[in-house]
Image (cartoon, coloured by chain):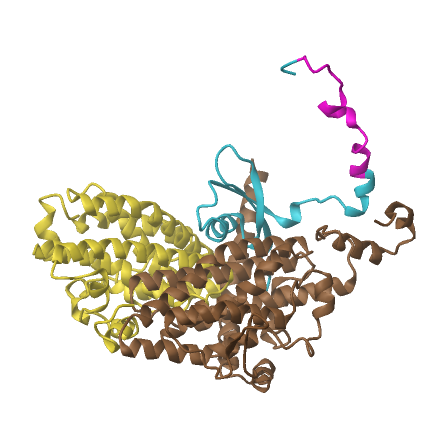
């Protein structure tokens, strides 16, 4: 162990800061932090929040069409949770000195990114199963390590998110399982959904390590515990046996167990498609943004009215107090 | 007009006998709405039996830069803790 | 089968089903995240109540009926919800107005239904009262905010109330099914709720600086299966899976 007390006075604020993180101390909103830490966190947390609320849309599509009452309430509760998670994350982000309205503005103007998986369409009921199983599955792999991230409000939000998410993936898998135990038409529906969601789910874990720009810094700040490629491998290794249980075929002819590495080998990911979607040219980028912007703009008069009413009430209260 | 809903801090008592604990924050136009929103956002899974809401701007927080003068002086006041006092082993119930 | 009881349960359950479905449409499209979460909660409460009613209806019907066959596999004219709850979400004022005008009735009804001689209905009512008390509070607060908010919101809220007012009188219509069960203390005589309904609603509208519509022209038909044009579209969505893929388990 280094002699800390001896050196502390000669360390810069930034060095002390990095040391605190290395010692597993949490950073809280009012603590001094390097501008880059603040910016990176605003970017990542808001991106995460945006993903939650844009993610409500593809699934929200099916709330009115869910095939049974049981499925309907489960889906509603799940989409509602996503709104809640967006809210927790926006709140965490706001502790860094940026308002939710500013963050919305970034999303609506296209400046901020969100998980590109939500730019794919949900065209059959089986997509509700595939999203829960694969997309939430990949999300959990990403999210669990964040419960220990260095920024306190983010870590606390993630603890809550992870606790609530535990039913989401099970909900999706159960939908898939029911389809796979059903009629031929239902099995086909399930296989088709897997075919369409498999590769986007793999892409969701981020670009490969050799091109990923943020990894090293993010590791230091505990925004990341494992690299994208490690997470992807973990996801594949745990998902393949689940597909076997369902009796579905993963749409990758190169997928096979590698005795030597103890992992599955898998085929080439189409990164051109990934970047196309990230850059705004996926199948549903426009629909998703139109929906978000539309909801926000249609809501303006409602939010304004609530503020006006609150002010009137406040004035009435004050006047009543004066009159006494 | 375009005035944004202010931020509120939400404190929830999980069950009687426990203190209210800070659960998070949310936006609301007034206290009534903050309470309703808090109920819907933070107690969906029966997490609470009582809610406090406080508009965030009314919270005064200590400055971490003053942590040294605020909190460190307490560290060497070991006589505030029972272990500071030596008693023979055969003294019971103390 | 006890046809009258079955029909009466549908009358109760269909209101919850259709009102819940309308609110569910909004999830992700509301004016703020907080209101999305709140409206979804109300929708979930209503679907929960729907399931209780339909599980009971399925028992009464027998014949392998399930909550889902009842919810999804009837024809338009077999739905017995009031016209009010099927009205679309034209804007947030309509949503809030529809909800409030229904919630007040719903709570008054449940407060009586909890004393029904039918133990199942009584139990469902007792559980639902707590949920619906909150619904009234939520929608009532929003009526006040929008009515007494800005000029624009006042205008929109007034328009919604004016348009939906025509559907309020149907709430108090007593169907044949209900009539046959009132004497035994099973069903509630909805007509007896009317006075206190308009009293409560009027008081709140006044507080919200809104004008109570004077119209004496009312629409009815929902309770006997003659609906507005909106229900067909709602059902086309809601029944899609069960109709397109019949006889499957989901």
Given residues C167 and A257, the one toward you in this image is A257
Name the outermost residue toward the front. Answer: A260
Q: How many marks?
A: 0
Snapshot quadrant of residue A125? bottom left
Q: Residue at x 64, y 76 (%)?
A: A111
Chain coloured yellow here: C
- The span shown in magenta is B70-91
Q: Along the horizontal axis of the image, is C146 left or right of A216?
A: left
Which of these two is toward me, A183 or C201? A183
Q: Is residue C8 above or below residue B78?
A: below
Quadrant position of residue B73: top right
Q: Is there any visible trace of residue B1 in the rendered image? A: no
From the image, state the color of chain B.
Answer: cyan
Q: Is residue C181 left or right of residue C195?
A: left
Q: Position of residue A181 (x, y in %)?
A: 30, 70
Residue lying at the far top of the rendered structure: B91
Point out the image quarter for the C terminus of chain B.
top right
Q: Residue at x 17, y 62 (%)?
A: C223
Q: Quadrant of the N terminus of chain B?
A: bottom right
Residue A207 is at least partly visible in this image: yes
Where's residue A256, x and y in %? Answer: 50, 78
In the image, is residue B71 part of the stretch drawn in magenta?
yes
The residue that appears at 21% across and 44% down in the rendered structure is C122
Q: Which chain is brown?
A: A
Residue drawn at point x = 34 percent, y = 64 percent: A72
- Examine the structure image and report whether residue C168 is included in the region drawn in magenta: no
Residue C184, position as x, y percentages in the image: 9, 44
Q: Name the spot of residue C123 as percent of width and height, x first.
A: 24, 44
Q: Is residue A230 above or below residue A280?
A: above
The image shows residue B91, relative to residue C51, as above or below, that is above
Q: In the image, C64: left or right of C45?
A: left
């Amino acid at each position: 162990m280094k002699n800390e007390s001896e050196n502390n006075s000669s360390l810069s604020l930034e060095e002390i800061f990095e040391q605190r993180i290395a010692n597993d101390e949490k950073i809280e909103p009012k603590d001094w932090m390097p501008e880059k830490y603040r910016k990176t966190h605003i970017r990542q947390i808001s991106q995460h929040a945006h993903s939650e609320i844009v993610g409500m849309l593809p699934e929200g599509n099916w709330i009115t069409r869910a095939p049974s009452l049981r499925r309907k309430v489960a889906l509603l509760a799940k989409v509602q949770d996503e709104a809640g998670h967006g809210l927790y994350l926006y709140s965490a982000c706001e502790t860094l000195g940026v308002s939710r309205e500013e963050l919305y503005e970034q999303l609506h103007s296209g400046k901020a990114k969100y998980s590109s998986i939500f730019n794919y369409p949900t065209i059959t009921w089986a997509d509700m199963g595939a999203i829960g199983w694969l997309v939430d599955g990949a999300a959990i792999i990403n999210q669990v390590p964040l419960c220990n991230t260095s920024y306190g409000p983010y870590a606390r939000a993630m603890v809550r998110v992870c606790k609530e998410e535990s039913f989401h993936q099970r909900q999706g898998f159960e939908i898939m399982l029911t389809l796979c135990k059903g009629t031929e038409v239902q099995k086909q529906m399930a296989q088709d959904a897997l075919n369409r969601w498999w590769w986007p789910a793999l892409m969701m874990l981020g670009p490969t390590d050799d091109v990923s720009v943020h990894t090293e810094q993010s590791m230091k700040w505990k925004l990341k515990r494992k690299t994208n490629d490690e997470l992807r491998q973990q996801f594949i290794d745990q998902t393949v046996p689940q597909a076997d249980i369902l009796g579905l075929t993963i749409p990758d002819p190169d997928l096979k167990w590698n005795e030597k590495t103890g992992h599955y080998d898998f085929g080439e990911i189409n990164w051109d498609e990934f970047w196309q979607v990230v850059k705004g040219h996926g199948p549903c980028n426009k629909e998703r943004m139109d929906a978000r912007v539309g909801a926000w703009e249609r809501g303006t008069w409602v939010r304004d009215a609530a503020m006006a009413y609150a002010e009137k009430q406040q004035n009435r209260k004050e006047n009543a107090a004066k009159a006494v | 007009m375009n005035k944004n809903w202010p931020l509120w801090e939400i404190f929830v008592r999980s069950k009687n006998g426990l203190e209210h604990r800070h659960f998070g924050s949310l936006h609301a136009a007034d206290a009534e709405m903050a309470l309703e929103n808090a109920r819907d956002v933070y107690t969906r899974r029966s997490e609470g039996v009582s809610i406090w809401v406080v508009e965030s701007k009314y919270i005064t927080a200590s400055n971490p830069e003053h942590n040294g003068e605020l909190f460190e002086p307490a560290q060497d006041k070991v006589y505030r803790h029972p272990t500071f006092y030596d008693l023979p082993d055969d003294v019971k119930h103390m | 089968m006890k046809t009258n009881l079955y029909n009466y349960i549908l009358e109760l359950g269909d209101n919850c089903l259709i009102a819940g479905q309308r609110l569910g449409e909004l999830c992700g499209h509301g004016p703020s995240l907080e209101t999305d979460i709140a409206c979804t909660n109300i929708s979930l409460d209503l679907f929960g109540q729907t399931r209780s009613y339909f599980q009971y209806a399925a028992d009464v019907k027998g014949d392998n009926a399930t909550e889902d066959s009842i919810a999804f596999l009837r024809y338009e004219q077999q739905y017995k919800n009031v016209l009010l709850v099927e009205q679309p979400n034209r804007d947030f004022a309509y949503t809030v107005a529809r909800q409030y005008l229904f919630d007040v009735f719903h709570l008054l009804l449940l407060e009586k239904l909890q004393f029904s001689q039918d133990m199942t209905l009584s139990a469902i009512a007792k559980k639902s009262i707590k949920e619906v008390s909150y619904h009234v509070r939520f929608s009532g607060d929003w009526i006040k905010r929008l009515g007494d908010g800005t000029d624009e919101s006042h205008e929109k809220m007034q328009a919604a109330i004016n348009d939906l007012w025509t559907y309020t009188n149907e709430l108090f219509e007593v169907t044949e099914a209900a009539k046959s069960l009132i004497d035994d203390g099973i069903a509630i005589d909805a007509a007896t709720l009317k006075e206190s309904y308009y009293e409560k609603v009027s008081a709140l509208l006044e507080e919200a600086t809104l004008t109570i519509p004077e119209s004496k022209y009312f629409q009815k038909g929902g309770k006997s299966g003659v609906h507005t044009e909106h229900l067909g579209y709602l059902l086309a969505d809601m029944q899609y899976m069960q109709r397109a893929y019949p006889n499957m388990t989901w």
